[in-house]
Image (tube, rainbow, N blue to C red):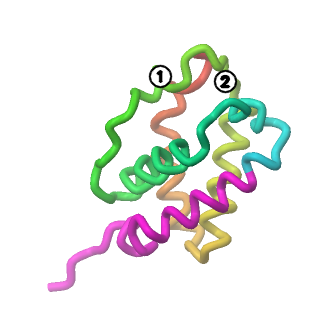
Amino acid sequence: METTKSLYEKIGGEQAISKVVDYFYKLVLADDTVNEFFKNTDMEKQRRHQTKFISFALGGPNQYSGKTMAKAHEGMNLQPVHFNAIVKHLHDSLAHFGVSEPEIEQALSHVAEVKDDVLYK
């Protein structure tokens, strides 16, 4: 009997996701819609957190021990335009590394679950 691989395993685990995250932040930091939110951010720490979050969202182990999503975004007053820009950059980053559209949609559905925790905080 063949076991179904998680999206995390199909993509190549945390090492591959780390590359996706690096590319993702190149797109994010080049985007004036959202880059202001990262002006005073320790980007190495941010990359590590994001890699663990995306790994978990794709069915990998939950190694994330940081703040809750609501707490991490408190005081930022993120709007739908900001959330949508981040989702687009994640989509494009996954696509850049050859992840199929159905798998990207699956990944983004996990990200959509945290939308209410990050908007308007």
The N terminus, quarter of image? bottom left
Asked which quadrant contains residue 7, the reply is: bottom left
Task: Establish if 105 lies above or below 83.
Answer: below
Query: Callout 2: few (<14), some (14-19), or many (20+) C-alpha neighbours within 10 Å?
Result: some
Q: Nearer the viewer, residue 80 or 74?
A: 74
**Residue type at mark 1?**
Ala
35 sits left or right of 96 in the view: right
Residue at 27% across, 74% down: 4
- The reply to whether the magenta stretch includes residue 96 is no
| First to last magenta residue range | 1-27
Q: Earlier in the sequence, mark 2 or mark 1?
A: 1
**Residue 60 rendering spot, x and y as whole percentages:** 32, 59
Q: CA distance from mark 2 to mark 1?
A: 11 Å
Label 2 SS: loop
The dominant secondary structure in magenta is: helix
Query: Callout 1: few (<14), some (14-19), or many (20+) C-alpha neighbours within 10 Å?
Result: some
Which residue is most to the left? 1
- The residue wearing badge 1 is 70
- The residue wearing badge 2 is 78
**Residue 113 rendering spot, x and y as whole percentages:** 46, 37
**Residue 80 rendering spot, x and y as whole percentages:** 69, 29
Asked which quadrant contains residue 58, the reply is: bottom left
Q: Nearer the viewer, residue 110 or 78?
A: 78
Label 1 SS: helix
